[in-house]
Amino acid sequence: MRSLSALSTRAKLGVGFGLVGILIIVLAVFAWRELGNVGQELAAQNTVRTTQLERLYELRESLAQTGLAARNAYIFPDVNDARRELALLDKHKARYLAQLQALEPLFVGNADFAKMRDGLLQMAQELNRPRRYRDAGQLTEYGSFLVNECSPLRRQNVLDIDRVITTVQQYVADGTAHAQESIATAKTTIVVVTLAAVALSVLIGSAITAHLLRQLGGEPVEVNRIASAIASGDLTVDVAVRPNDDASVMHAIREMQASLQNIVAQVRGGTDMIATASS
Protein backbone atom coordinates (compact mmCIF):
# COMPACT_ATOMS: atom_id res chain seq x y z
CA MET A 1 0.00 0.00 0.00
CA ARG A 2 2.85 2.41 0.80
CA SER A 3 4.49 1.74 -2.55
CA LEU A 4 1.14 2.37 -4.24
CA SER A 5 0.68 5.62 -2.33
CA ALA A 6 4.12 6.75 -3.47
CA LEU A 7 3.07 6.48 -7.12
CA SER A 8 2.11 9.56 -9.07
CA THR A 9 -1.51 10.15 -10.00
CA ARG A 10 -0.74 9.28 -13.61
CA ALA A 11 0.85 6.00 -12.52
CA LYS A 12 -2.12 5.16 -10.32
CA LEU A 13 -4.50 5.83 -13.18
CA GLY A 14 -2.38 3.61 -15.40
CA VAL A 15 -2.37 0.77 -12.87
CA GLY A 16 -6.11 1.02 -12.25
CA PHE A 17 -7.22 1.10 -15.83
CA GLY A 18 -4.56 -1.45 -16.72
CA LEU A 19 -6.28 -3.89 -14.36
CA VAL A 20 -9.61 -3.16 -16.02
CA GLY A 21 -7.99 -3.72 -19.41
CA ILE A 22 -6.58 -7.06 -18.26
CA LEU A 23 -10.04 -8.15 -17.11
CA ILE A 24 -11.51 -7.20 -20.47
CA ILE A 25 -8.77 -9.12 -22.30
CA VAL A 26 -9.37 -12.17 -20.09
CA LEU A 27 -13.08 -11.91 -20.84
CA ALA A 28 -12.44 -11.69 -24.59
CA VAL A 29 -10.04 -14.67 -24.56
CA PHE A 30 -12.46 -16.76 -22.51
CA ALA A 31 -15.39 -15.91 -24.78
CA TRP A 32 -13.34 -16.70 -27.89
CA ARG A 33 -12.20 -20.04 -26.43
CA GLU A 34 -15.70 -21.05 -25.35
CA LEU A 35 -17.17 -20.12 -28.72
CA GLY A 36 -14.46 -22.23 -30.35
CA ASN A 37 -15.28 -25.19 -28.10
CA VAL A 38 -18.99 -24.88 -28.82
CA GLY A 39 -18.27 -24.61 -32.53
CA GLN A 40 -16.16 -27.76 -32.44
CA GLU A 41 -18.84 -29.60 -30.48
CA LEU A 42 -21.56 -28.61 -32.94
CA ALA A 43 -19.32 -29.51 -35.88
CA ALA A 44 -18.73 -32.94 -34.32
CA GLN A 45 -22.47 -33.48 -33.93
CA ASN A 46 -23.06 -32.41 -37.52
CA THR A 47 -20.39 -34.88 -38.66
CA VAL A 48 -22.12 -37.67 -36.74
CA ARG A 49 -25.41 -36.76 -38.37
CA THR A 50 -24.00 -36.82 -41.89
CA THR A 51 -21.68 -39.82 -41.54
CA GLN A 52 -23.80 -42.02 -39.31
CA LEU A 53 -27.45 -41.03 -38.88
CA GLU A 54 -28.17 -40.17 -42.51
CA ARG A 55 -26.50 -43.37 -43.68
CA LEU A 56 -28.46 -45.42 -41.17
CA TYR A 57 -31.69 -43.80 -42.35
CA GLU A 58 -30.81 -44.54 -45.97
CA LEU A 59 -29.84 -48.09 -45.07
CA ARG A 60 -33.19 -48.65 -43.37
CA GLU A 61 -35.07 -47.16 -46.31
CA SER A 62 -33.16 -49.32 -48.81
CA LEU A 63 -33.95 -52.40 -46.73
CA ALA A 64 -37.64 -51.48 -46.78
CA GLN A 65 -37.50 -51.07 -50.57
CA THR A 66 -36.03 -54.57 -50.95
CA GLY A 67 -39.07 -55.89 -49.10
CA LEU A 68 -41.46 -54.07 -51.43
CA ALA A 69 -39.59 -55.24 -54.51
CA ALA A 70 -39.53 -58.86 -53.28
CA ARG A 71 -43.27 -58.76 -52.60
CA ASN A 72 -44.05 -57.15 -55.97
CA ALA A 73 -41.93 -59.70 -57.82
CA TYR A 74 -44.08 -62.38 -56.18
CA ILE A 75 -47.51 -60.86 -56.86
CA PHE A 76 -46.93 -59.49 -60.40
CA PRO A 77 -48.14 -62.13 -62.86
CA ASP A 78 -46.19 -60.71 -65.79
CA VAL A 79 -42.68 -62.11 -65.96
CA ASN A 80 -41.15 -58.88 -67.27
CA ASP A 81 -42.74 -56.84 -64.46
CA ALA A 82 -41.46 -59.35 -61.95
CA ARG A 83 -37.96 -59.14 -63.39
CA ARG A 84 -38.01 -55.34 -63.14
CA GLU A 85 -38.93 -55.66 -59.48
CA LEU A 86 -36.15 -58.17 -58.94
CA ALA A 87 -33.72 -55.72 -60.55
CA LEU A 88 -34.93 -53.05 -58.10
CA LEU A 89 -34.45 -55.53 -55.28
CA ASP A 90 -30.82 -56.06 -56.30
CA LYS A 91 -30.32 -52.29 -56.64
CA HIS A 92 -31.65 -51.50 -53.15
CA LYS A 93 -29.75 -54.43 -51.65
CA ALA A 94 -26.53 -53.07 -53.16
CA ARG A 95 -27.32 -49.65 -51.68
CA TYR A 96 -27.82 -50.88 -48.15
CA LEU A 97 -24.72 -53.06 -48.38
CA ALA A 98 -22.72 -50.02 -49.52
CA GLN A 99 -24.01 -47.99 -46.57
CA LEU A 100 -23.24 -50.88 -44.24
CA GLN A 101 -19.67 -51.02 -45.54
CA ALA A 102 -19.25 -47.24 -45.09
CA LEU A 103 -20.60 -47.40 -41.54
CA GLU A 104 -18.53 -50.33 -40.32
CA PRO A 105 -15.28 -48.38 -39.61
CA LEU A 106 -17.29 -45.89 -37.52
CA PHE A 107 -18.70 -48.57 -35.19
CA VAL A 108 -15.68 -50.74 -34.43
CA GLY A 109 -16.32 -52.63 -31.19
CA ASN A 110 -20.02 -51.70 -31.07
CA ALA A 111 -22.00 -54.84 -30.20
CA ASP A 112 -25.34 -53.46 -31.43
CA PHE A 113 -23.84 -52.56 -34.78
CA ALA A 114 -22.20 -55.98 -35.07
CA LYS A 115 -25.57 -57.65 -34.49
CA MET A 116 -27.22 -55.36 -37.04
CA ARG A 117 -24.46 -56.05 -39.58
CA ASP A 118 -24.72 -59.82 -39.20
CA GLY A 119 -28.49 -59.69 -39.64
CA LEU A 120 -28.25 -57.51 -42.75
CA LEU A 121 -25.60 -59.74 -44.31
CA GLN A 122 -27.85 -62.72 -43.66
CA MET A 123 -30.72 -60.83 -45.29
CA ALA A 124 -28.52 -60.08 -48.31
CA GLN A 125 -27.95 -63.81 -48.73
CA GLU A 126 -31.64 -64.58 -48.34
CA LEU A 127 -32.58 -61.97 -50.96
CA ASN A 128 -30.89 -64.10 -53.61
CA ARG A 129 -33.69 -66.64 -53.29
CA PRO A 130 -36.60 -64.60 -54.80
CA ARG A 131 -34.93 -64.60 -58.23
CA ARG A 132 -34.34 -68.36 -58.08
CA TYR A 133 -37.93 -69.00 -57.02
CA ARG A 134 -39.33 -66.73 -59.72
CA ASP A 135 -37.13 -68.08 -62.50
CA ALA A 136 -38.04 -71.65 -61.51
CA GLY A 137 -41.74 -70.81 -61.23
CA GLN A 138 -41.78 -71.96 -57.60
CA LEU A 139 -44.34 -69.40 -56.44
CA THR A 140 -45.59 -71.54 -53.55
CA GLU A 141 -42.11 -71.79 -52.12
CA TYR A 142 -41.61 -68.09 -52.90
CA GLY A 143 -44.71 -67.12 -50.90
CA SER A 144 -43.74 -69.36 -48.00
CA PHE A 145 -40.28 -67.79 -47.97
CA LEU A 146 -41.70 -64.26 -47.85
CA VAL A 147 -44.06 -65.01 -44.97
CA ASN A 148 -42.10 -67.45 -42.85
CA GLU A 149 -38.49 -66.41 -43.36
CA CYS A 150 -38.05 -63.06 -45.05
CA SER A 151 -40.59 -61.00 -43.08
CA PRO A 152 -39.48 -62.12 -39.58
CA LEU A 153 -35.84 -61.55 -40.48
CA ARG A 154 -36.65 -58.13 -41.92
CA ARG A 155 -38.53 -57.12 -38.77
CA GLN A 156 -35.52 -58.13 -36.70
CA ASN A 157 -33.27 -56.18 -39.07
CA VAL A 158 -35.39 -53.07 -38.56
CA LEU A 159 -35.29 -53.48 -34.78
CA ASP A 160 -31.50 -53.81 -34.88
CA ILE A 161 -31.15 -50.74 -37.11
CA ASP A 162 -33.46 -48.72 -34.87
CA ARG A 163 -31.42 -49.72 -31.82
CA VAL A 164 -28.24 -48.39 -33.42
CA ILE A 165 -30.05 -45.25 -34.60
CA THR A 166 -31.33 -44.63 -31.06
CA THR A 167 -27.80 -44.94 -29.68
CA VAL A 168 -26.45 -42.44 -32.21
CA GLN A 169 -29.37 -40.07 -31.64
CA GLN A 170 -28.68 -40.18 -27.90
CA TYR A 171 -25.02 -39.41 -28.54
CA VAL A 172 -25.98 -36.42 -30.68
CA ALA A 173 -28.52 -35.26 -28.08
CA ASP A 174 -25.90 -35.52 -25.32
CA GLY A 175 -23.41 -33.57 -27.40
CA THR A 176 -25.98 -30.89 -28.15
CA ALA A 177 -26.89 -30.67 -24.45
CA HIS A 178 -23.21 -30.35 -23.57
CA ALA A 179 -22.83 -27.56 -26.12
CA GLN A 180 -25.84 -25.78 -24.62
CA GLU A 181 -24.35 -26.16 -21.15
CA SER A 182 -21.09 -24.69 -22.43
CA ILE A 183 -23.00 -21.74 -23.87
CA ALA A 184 -24.84 -21.22 -20.57
CA THR A 185 -21.57 -21.44 -18.62
CA ALA A 186 -19.90 -18.99 -20.99
CA LYS A 187 -22.80 -16.56 -20.64
CA THR A 188 -22.63 -16.77 -16.84
CA THR A 189 -18.87 -16.29 -16.79
CA ILE A 190 -19.06 -13.36 -19.20
CA VAL A 191 -21.71 -11.69 -17.04
CA VAL A 192 -19.68 -12.28 -13.85
CA VAL A 193 -16.43 -11.00 -15.36
CA THR A 194 -18.23 -8.01 -16.87
CA LEU A 195 -19.76 -7.13 -13.50
CA ALA A 196 -16.35 -7.58 -11.89
CA ALA A 197 -14.81 -5.22 -14.45
CA VAL A 198 -17.55 -2.66 -13.83
CA ALA A 199 -17.16 -3.00 -10.05
CA LEU A 200 -13.39 -2.67 -10.34
CA SER A 201 -13.79 0.40 -12.53
CA VAL A 202 -16.12 1.99 -9.97
CA LEU A 203 -13.74 1.05 -7.14
CA ILE A 204 -10.72 2.44 -8.95
CA GLY A 205 -12.60 5.60 -9.87
CA SER A 206 -13.72 6.08 -6.27
CA ALA A 207 -10.21 5.43 -4.94
CA ILE A 208 -8.63 7.87 -7.39
CA THR A 209 -11.28 10.50 -6.63
CA ALA A 210 -10.72 10.10 -2.88
CA HIS A 211 -6.95 10.31 -3.41
CA LEU A 212 -7.26 13.51 -5.46
CA LEU A 213 -9.60 15.05 -2.90
CA ARG A 214 -7.12 14.22 -0.13
CA GLN A 215 -4.34 15.86 -2.13
CA LEU A 216 -6.46 18.95 -2.79
CA GLY A 217 -8.00 19.05 0.68
CA GLY A 218 -11.44 19.83 -0.73
CA GLU A 219 -13.50 20.01 -3.86
CA PRO A 220 -11.57 21.40 -6.86
CA VAL A 221 -14.14 24.19 -7.30
CA GLU A 222 -13.73 25.28 -3.67
CA VAL A 223 -9.93 25.19 -3.87
CA ASN A 224 -10.04 27.28 -7.04
CA ARG A 225 -12.42 29.83 -5.45
CA ILE A 226 -10.23 30.31 -2.38
CA ALA A 227 -7.02 30.53 -4.39
CA SER A 228 -8.61 33.11 -6.72
CA ALA A 229 -9.86 35.17 -3.76
CA ILE A 230 -6.42 35.27 -2.16
CA ALA A 231 -4.82 36.08 -5.50
CA SER A 232 -7.26 39.02 -5.75
CA GLY A 233 -6.08 40.33 -2.38
CA ASP A 234 -8.81 38.96 -0.12
CA LEU A 235 -6.82 37.54 2.77
CA THR A 236 -9.90 37.22 4.98
CA VAL A 237 -11.50 34.40 2.99
CA ASP A 238 -12.22 31.37 5.15
CA VAL A 239 -9.93 28.43 4.34
CA ALA A 240 -11.47 25.28 5.80
CA VAL A 241 -8.92 22.51 6.37
CA ARG A 242 -9.94 19.02 7.36
CA PRO A 243 -8.75 17.60 10.69
CA ASN A 244 -5.25 16.08 10.62
CA ASP A 245 -4.65 17.56 7.17
CA ASP A 246 -1.11 18.84 6.94
CA ALA A 247 -0.17 17.93 3.37
CA SER A 248 -3.00 19.03 1.06
CA VAL A 249 -3.17 21.97 -1.32
CA MET A 250 -5.84 23.54 0.92
CA HIS A 251 -3.49 23.28 3.91
CA ALA A 252 -0.74 24.94 1.88
CA ILE A 253 -3.15 27.72 0.86
CA ARG A 254 -4.07 28.35 4.48
CA GLU A 255 -0.40 28.45 5.44
CA MET A 256 0.22 30.86 2.58
CA GLN A 257 -2.76 32.97 3.69
CA ALA A 258 -1.44 33.12 7.26
CA SER A 259 2.01 34.06 5.99
CA LEU A 260 0.61 36.81 3.78
CA GLN A 261 -1.55 38.11 6.62
CA ASN A 262 1.56 38.24 8.83
CA ILE A 263 3.53 40.06 6.13
CA VAL A 264 0.71 42.56 5.62
CA ALA A 265 0.46 43.10 9.38
CA GLN A 266 4.20 43.73 9.60
CA VAL A 267 4.07 46.15 6.68
CA ARG A 268 1.17 48.02 8.25
CA GLY A 269 2.98 48.13 11.60
CA GLY A 270 6.08 49.56 9.95
CA THR A 271 4.01 52.08 8.07
CA ASP A 272 2.28 53.20 11.27
CA MET A 273 5.63 53.61 13.03
CA ILE A 274 6.97 55.73 10.18
CA ALA A 275 3.83 57.86 10.20
CA THR A 276 4.07 58.38 13.98
CA ALA A 277 7.74 59.32 13.81
CA SER A 278 7.08 61.79 11.02
CA SER A 279 4.37 63.53 12.99
Image: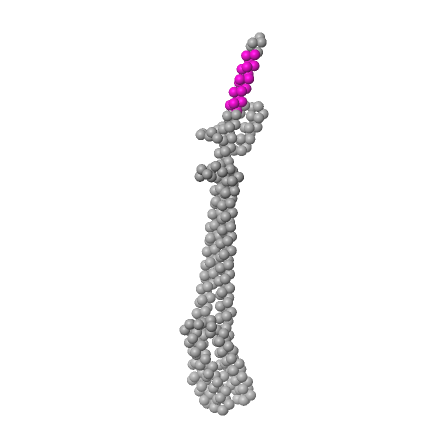
Going 54% across and 32% down the picture, which residue do you hit?
A: 221
When the figure is inspected, residue 226 is found, relative to residue 179, above or below; the finding is: above
Q: Nearer the viewer, residue 1 or 125?
A: 1
When the figure is inspected, residue 52 is found, relative to residue 72, above or below; the finding is: above
Quadrant housing residue 171: bottom left
Name the residue furthest left: 111
Horizontal and vertical percent position of residue 123: 45, 81
Residue 32 magenta: no
Quadrant housing residue 234: top right
Residue 271 seen in the figure: yes
Going 52% across and 78% down the picture, which residue do you hit?
A: 95
Name the residue furthest top: 279
Going 47% across and 86% down the picture, which residue do you hit?
A: 129
Horizontal and vertical percent position of residue 260: 53, 22
Q: In what quadrant of the picture does the C terminus appear? A: top right
Q: In what quadrant of the picture does the N terminus appear? A: top left
Horizontal and vertical percent position of residue 23: 49, 48
Residue 260 magenta: yes
The magenta span reads: 257-274
Residue 198 seen in the figure: no
Horizontal and vertical percent position of residue 55: 50, 73
**What is the chief secondary structure element of the magenta stretch?**
helix
Q: How many marks?
A: 0
Going 51% across and 30% down the picture, which residue do you hit?
A: 249
